[in-house]
Image: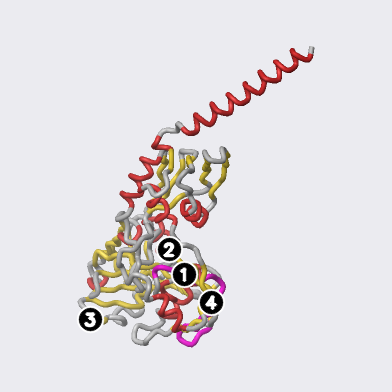
């Protein structure tokens, strides 16, 4: 009886051992296009995509390789603001936009904490230290390591097999910082797999399903120059990343009696030429301009494109200074006033203003 029990135990141990070895073999034999290798090109591209983008707060720190952690306090042209999120950068911009003729000034209340591209943190005690750190970043619109035209969508499930310890860990990556650290700490002997498919989002907000590392490498490589990363300090030049024809149509047609607040053609100011004129835009592509009860003008308008390449074509025959193929530069809501800024190069500018918000 004891002999039979012993033989049965040996059989069970052998079965379990063989099964485990089979599972490990299957894991080790994962196809190359589904295995992430340390120091490979795809690992490098993934880490560049996951880098912290420091350009979002350039209106404050003028530095592309780090950003300031919230909350912190600034003084913009004499007005004190507490910045709690990226949305509050609009408050700074609204203050700066109040005048085109003044010199904008911004002072930060120290100490502050900044997050570097690799997500490490540094405490900054004064402006000298901030400027010194900013000088280590690449300048305006100079190519840097971070890839901003494609983003990972989380969570991303991953598995790590260590052949030395024969351990298998299954994890779920939840953010860019976790992905960056994960790739940074890959052991050369580790066998890494991702539970494909995963999703990535391009700068035009389209989503792409990725089935293996080969597809991911192609998608990231193609996205490197897919968009303008906006790594400059001019907060007025690209504020319509997510604008669509529906966006501008909703804003212009939802409010009545727009006025021309600023107008420049061929570098000549005509800010006051249409004082008293009220512009009304309609969803059928028509625009009516009323000067008085008995005086109205008719015209048309259309919107085409998207983002920072959205054109608005205005044609009001009796008001030629309004007519142009304008580029939508910015839709700005400051206080209770909505402003729609249209430009053509540096010579022409048209700003419609309305307090209906």
Q: Position of residue 208 (x, y in %)?
A: 40, 44
Q: Earlier in the sequence, mark 1 or mark 4?
A: 1
Quarter of the figure with residue 230? bottom left
Q: Is residue 293 visible?
A: no
Query: Counting other residues with Cα less than 10 Å from the Cα at mark 2, is it few (<14), some (14-19), or many (20 or more)?
Result: many
Query: Counting other residues with Cα less than 10 Å from the Cα at mark 1, is it few (<14), some (14-19), or many (20 or more)?
Result: many
Q: Pick the residue in front: 325 or 9.
A: 9
Residue depth check, mark 2 versus mark 3: number of the one nearer the observer: 2
Q: Secondary structure at mark 1?
A: strand
Query: Counting other residues with Cα less than 10 Å from the Cα at mark 3, is it few (<14), some (14-19), or many (20 or more)?
Result: few
Disc marking residue 67: 1
Q: CB atoms at circles 2 and 3 under 8 Å apart?
A: no
Task: State which region is magenta.
Answer: 64-80
Q: Secondary structure at mark 4?
A: strand
According to the picture, the residue beneath numbered tag 2 turns out to be 53
Residue drawn at the location 33% of the way across and 44% of the way down: 218
Disc marking residue 268: 3
According to the picture, the residue beneath numbered tag 4 turns out to be 112
Disc marking residue 54: none
Q: Earlier in the sequence, mark 2 or mark 1?
A: 2
Q: Is residue 355 left or right of residue 273?
A: right
- As measured in the structure, the alpha-carbon distance from the residue carrying label 2 to the one carrying label 1 is 8 Å
- As measured in the structure, the alpha-carbon distance from the residue carrying label 2 to the one carrying label 4 is 18 Å
- As measured in the structure, the alpha-carbon distance from the residue carrying label 3 to the one carrying label 4 is 43 Å
Q: Secondary structure at mark 2?
A: loop
């Amino acid at each position: 009886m004891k002999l039979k029990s012993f033989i049965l135990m040996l059989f069970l141990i052998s079965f379990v051992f063989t099964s485990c070895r089979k599972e490990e073999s299957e894991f080790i034999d994962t196809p190359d296009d589904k295995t992430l290798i340390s120091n490979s090109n795809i690992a490098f591209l993934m880490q560049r995509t996951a880098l912290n983008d420091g350009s979002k707060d350039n209106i404050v720190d003028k530095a592309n390789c780090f950003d300031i952690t919230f909350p912190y306090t600034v003084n913009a042209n004499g007005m004190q603001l507490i910045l709690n999120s990226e949305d509050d950068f609009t408050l700074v911009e609204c203050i700066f936009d109040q005048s085109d003729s003044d010199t904008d000034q911004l002072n930060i209340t120290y100490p502050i904490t900044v997050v570097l591209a690799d997500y490490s943190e540094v405490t900054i005690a004064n402006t000298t230290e901030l400027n010194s750190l900013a000088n280590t970043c690449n300048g305006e619109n100079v190519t840097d390591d971070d890839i901003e035209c494609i983003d990972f969508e989380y969570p991303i499930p991953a598995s790590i097999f260590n052949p030395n310890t024969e351990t298998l860990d299954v994890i779920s990556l939840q953010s860019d910082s976790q992905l960056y650290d994960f790739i940074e700490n890959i052991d050369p002997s580790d066998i890494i797999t991702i539970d494909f498919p995963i999703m990535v989002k391009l700068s035009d907000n389209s989503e792409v399903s990725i089935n293996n590392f080969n597809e991911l490498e192609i998608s990231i490589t193609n996205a490197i120059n897919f968009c303008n990363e906006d790594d400059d300090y001019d907060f007025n030049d690209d504020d319509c990343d997510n604008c669509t024809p529906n966006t501008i149509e909703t804003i212009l047609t939802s409010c009545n009696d727009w006025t021309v607040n600023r107008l420049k053609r061929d570098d000549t100011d005509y800010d006051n030429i249409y004082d008293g004129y009220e512009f009304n835009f309609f969803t059928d592509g028509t625009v009516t301009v009323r000067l008085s009860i008995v005086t109205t003008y008719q015209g048309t308008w259309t919107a085409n494109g998207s983002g920072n390449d959205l054109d608005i074509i205005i044609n009001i025959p009796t008001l030629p200074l309004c007519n142009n193929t304008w580029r939508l530069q910015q839709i700005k809501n400051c206080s209770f006033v909505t402003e729609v800024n249209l430009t053509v190069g540096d010579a022409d500018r048209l700003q419609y203003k309305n307090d209906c918000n």
